[in-house]
Amino acid sequence: MIAVDYRKILIFFVLMFSILSTQAQVCGTLSDLNGTRLKRNLKESLSQFNHKDGLIDYVPIQFIIVNRNDGTGGIPEERIFESLCLTNRLFASLEIQFYINDVFIELNSTSIFSQSTNNSGFVQALYDQNKVTNAINVFVGGELASGNSAYYSGGSDVIYMDKMYINNKDVILAHELGHFFSLRHTFWGWEQTDYDINNATPTAVFIGNTSHEVEYVDRNLNCAEAADLICDTPADYIRDWGGGCNYLGGAVDPIGVLLDPDERNLMAYYSFASCDQYYFSETQKSVILSDLNSRVALRDLEPNVLNPVLETVKLTSPLQGSSVFYDDVNLTWNPVENAEFYYIELSRLPSFGVIHEVLISDVNYVNISGLLMDRTYHWRVAPFNAIDFCSFEPSDQWSFITSETTSYNVLANQGKVYVYPNPCNGDKLSVKSNAKDEIISWQILDVTGKVCLSSSFSQSALPLSQSINVSGLETGLYIFSTRTKEFSIQQKFIIQ
């Protein structure tokens, strides 16, 4: 009779299913080999950071959308919002919430977008040139040639994310933030070693030429000196598992005790195992809080607005169904209380099933060029701020039709009247004209056509050069309109 090891057969089929069903998530973070920050944070957390005060720590995060040199390949902004909302849910138990430091930065750099080697010296120099101060910097670009999904660069203190993993389901951004706050993988030391069930488990593994002690299952042996140095995370050697949220791979520690890792821990590698929830252990939370406390540049910062956005946007221009010049479309709407930013969607379909363009503005207007002529476009706007961005409430949708002529009937010789500076950020708007006809009167209209200011010029001789006091006008888009005996001339300008 042949003896059959059913345990090995089960493991074989589980591993085969893992290989066939999913591609392993791989984090490229290998910084802080000596664990200097982690050890300091562990020491301080034992006495100072084992509880919270009930107040939320707001931490600024800056996303840098990386494109290729030609401006292509960047991630859609809406996916960043999705990923950050998921991340905030995962950090809620720590009373930490990340807020949007500023509107997303666009960076054209093929060198970052298509990295061949994680965190090379050249790429690190680009990080240092383009990151912002007083915020966590997250660069989001293309697929890493190394196959990693993301990594934390300890040298530049930034995170790089493959855009594929920025969404509303993958928890990799939270994982990398754990590294940012000094946490190791739960399987620390095994990053460059595959666990082999057919060989005896070693007592040490290597990262490069550096030896690391293998952690035992028994928490009384070496949990504080080995692997992640944290004793409330079980021993774990696995960095490639896709067989569900219950590890059945059969790994044992050096004395033969079966591993029972925590598949839901955010610093483990079971992120594709479809667990119902992921979290940090209590000691990991204390380490994160200790590290945050040591980061002076991130401490005691709060977003400008802490109140939620309660209103929806009311669109103002172009009016519903109106005709506009295809290459110079100005969309405007009324500002909303507590809103710092506006999320604008443009679509050819009234259902918005396909989005033509997404824009983010920190003022209540945007200018769009390069649209197709003789087409109908639908648009809507949703307000948000640095802390309230997880549930956009869009405005009613309006539409406009593009044409070769402008809706303001601006004549071809509009260059004979100049207003400056544009945008205007002071009290005075200067007007110059070299028109052949005497200018009789002028008006300043808002985008709805309402007359805000009007008068006649005191100077009739040409060329004309005068200033207009616009200190009473609110920020926004305006139309400067002049009349002569023969024609009218209009020019758009912005008050900041």
Image (cartoon, rainbow, N blue to C red):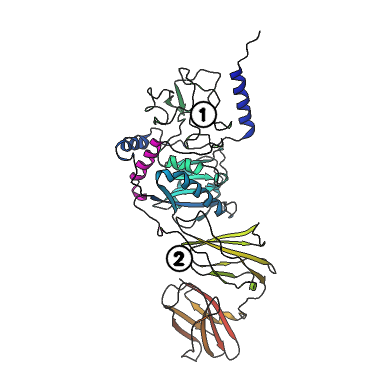
**In front: 183, or 264?**
264
Q: Secondary structure at mark 1?
A: loop
The span from disc 1 to disc 2 (Cα, nearest Å) is 50 Å
**In front: 40, or 96?**
96
Above or below for 413 versus 438: above
| Label 2 environment density (alpha carbons within 10 Å; few <14, some 14–19, many ≥20) | some
Q: Position of residue 245 (x, y in %)?
A: 55, 33
| Label 1 environment density (alpha carbons within 10 Å; few <14, some 14–19, many ≥20) | many
Q: Which mark is residue 337?
A: 2
Q: Quadrant of residue 93?
A: top left
Most distant residue in the left direction: 47
Q: Amino acid at mark 2?
A: Glu
- Main secondary-structure element of the magenta-colored stretch: helix
Residue on which the image places disc 1: 238
Above or below for 375 versus 233: below
Q: Position of residue 112 (x, y in %)?
A: 52, 47
Q: Quadrant of residue 288?
A: top left
Q: Residue at x 45, y 17 (%)?
A: 255
Above or below for 338 versus 141: below
Count of marks overlaid on the render = 2
Q: Which mark is residue 396?
A: none
